[in-house]
Image (spheres, helix red, strand yellow):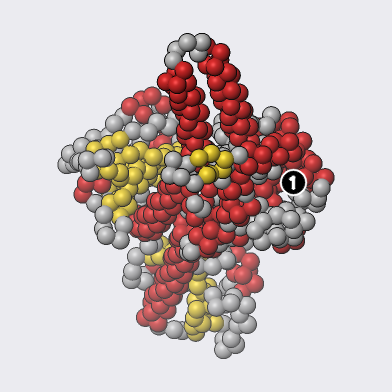
Amino acid sequence: MAKNLYYFRPSALLKVLRHLPGAYRLVALDRAQSSHPDWTLPAVLVADAREDDLKQIERLAPEGGWRLIYFLQGNSLPKSRFNGRLFAVLPRQAPRAVLERAVESAFDTLNMEEERRRTGLQLRLVATELETLNKIGVALSTERNPDALLELILTKSREITGCDAGSLYLAEEDPEGAKHLVFKLTQSDSHSVPFRQFTLPIDTRSIAGYAAATGNILNIKDAYRIRNLPFRLNRDFDQKFGYRTKSILVVPMKNQKDEVIGVLQLINAKRNPAVKLATRQIVHREVIPFSERSQELASSLASQAAVALENSLLYREIENLFEGFVKASVLAIESRDPTTFGHSERVAKLTVGLAEAVDRSDAGPYRDIHFTSQDIREIRYASILHDFGKVGVREEVLVKAKKLYPSQIEFINKRFQYIRKVLELDAYRKKLDHVLTNGNQNYQPFFAEIETAEGKELQQLDEFLSHVLQANEPTVLPVKTSEKLVEIAGWSFQDPSGPTEPLLTAEELRFLTIPKGSLDPEERVQIESHVIHSFRFLSQIPWTKELRRIPLIAKAHHEKLDGSGYPYHMKAEEIPFQAKMMTISDIFDALTARDRPYKRAVPMERALDIIGQEVKSQLLDPVLFQLFVEAKIFQITAKE
């Protein structure tokens, strides 16, 4: 660093200054100069009190980076206002050796001051960089979306290194277990780059592949002049877009096991990060090699990024695992009750759609209710799993499509077939007895009489069976049909084993006289118990904080605002808001489902009318139903 020794001319001190030992650059200042001179720092100004006024020196002196050595006139000390710039005050008779030592010490002081300044700047820079890395680390650790995380990693890497462009590769395994790099992301300040995903082998034939294969950082000053390495730059991009790739920093991203899980490739460090590299001339002027400090920062960030990325991927794997568990659970439900196939998924879509409509609403009593992505996820899972408790319901009850169980109606059919055969055999026996007693003369009138009586009995038997089959349908039972069933049950037949049996048993009659639907009160209690089973099952799962309300939401999906729902008879204020949405979706899908054997699908308009009647009866939330209709949520599953 040059040592600039200033004086005012003319000066009697010049002769002494010229003979000072050391590499000093003597610079003269004009005493009469009115403008501020251009100082070259560091500088020491030697002045004589007999010739140079301190006020004049103060006016011409720079802000910092200089010291004053002042020769006194007489014994009076100057009143300095130079804030430490006055380094030494010497008598005019001071030996030259004293001046030599003073000048040398003044420059030493300036050097130490400059060193302190630089060290302070460096410490502040390091502190800023550490703070930046810490903030980046926090941001990386809190980002759960892997795609957003990749964007964040590349963006922050480019920011802290001040580079123009970058790309990111992830190491993935194929089904055979072989690893390769997948080009996942690219960014550029200077060009809009079309993205196309491709793969690279992990070997030394490419820049990214080399870093992944060796685990070493590459800091290339000029990508067009790569020497003593087994790869070369692919210049296709540069040629296509008129770009010039020059400096490259490639950092492997390693996990805690020291395995490479990705590669960070940064391109063209810039003097001024804001400059766009639109031409090769600008590249030549602005692009610089990546500094060691940039390499250290990128390496540190890559280490943090690798941990965050692996955690994010692990988090996604856990989510996928749980998603698979949920789907398997739904499959288990639907396997036991195939008639409701797709119901849980449709309810989930409708409920999520309604929740999103509530979130968008900017008017009405629910305008302040909003749902985060985690809230929506919670609603979706609660909706998908709301019927899981059906696994705890007896299968024959769960899938009961008609009033009688299949085995019962089959037994009745066989019973009536047996009675038919008995009547037919009885007619044949009577004919045979007549012929054996009276011969075959004039048998026709007797046979006709027997056949007429047999026909009436068989017709009556068929009518009885028809009434039974009609009553077995899960519709509203007319009073006349109920009375007819009691009449049928009063008839009896002779069992082959001896005792007389009724045409319909007491249990068969009880089922057939169910007023509406296919379930008697006991069976209905069993079906309704699926809600309790669902709650118990879902309560056993150690949900995360974001999903902890799933059991409470699912347990209330059959509750009504007036407390008439089941199984807990909750009132409006006790029912979770999410469950109120699910209830509307559940009812709508149950009404419009085409796959229920115990009822016909209701047209969409009719289904909305039925739900509207329940709203008027103060059973369902009117505002949520209004949003369900106005936002056309019902159309979400219309094609399914």
**Residue 121 at x, y percent in the picture:** 47, 66
Left or right: 348 in relation to 172: right
Residue at disc 1, secondary structure: helix
| Figure check: 391 above or below 122 | above
Q: Which residue is mark 1?
A: 624
Which residue is pictured at 37% across the width and 58% down the height?
Answer: 307
Viewer-proximal residue among 592 and 631: 592
Which residue is pictured at 61% across the width and 39% down the height?
Answer: 491
Viewer-proximal residue among 297 and 363: 363
Q: Is residue 388 visible?
A: no
Mark 1: give few (<14), some (14-19) or many (20+) Cα within 10 Å.
many
Q: Amino acid at mark 1?
A: Leu
Left or right: 265 in relation to 569: left
Left or right: 182 in relation to 216: right
- Residue sitting farthest toward the bottom: 75
| Figure check: 113 above or below 628 | below
Q: Quadrant of residue 306?
A: bottom left
**Residue 478 at x, y percent in the picture:** 73, 36
Which residue is pictured at 30% across the width and 44% down the height?
Answer: 172
Q: Quadrant of residue 515?
A: top right
**Residue 238 at x, y percent in the picture:** 36, 29
Viewer-proximal residue among 29 and 167: 167
Q: Is residue 321 visible?
A: yes
Left or right: 469 in relation to 357: left
Which residue is pictured at 74% across the width and 58% down the height?
Answer: 563
| Figure check: 428 above or below 218 | above
Quadrant for the C terminus in the image = top right
**Residue 500 at x, y percent in the picture:** 52, 44
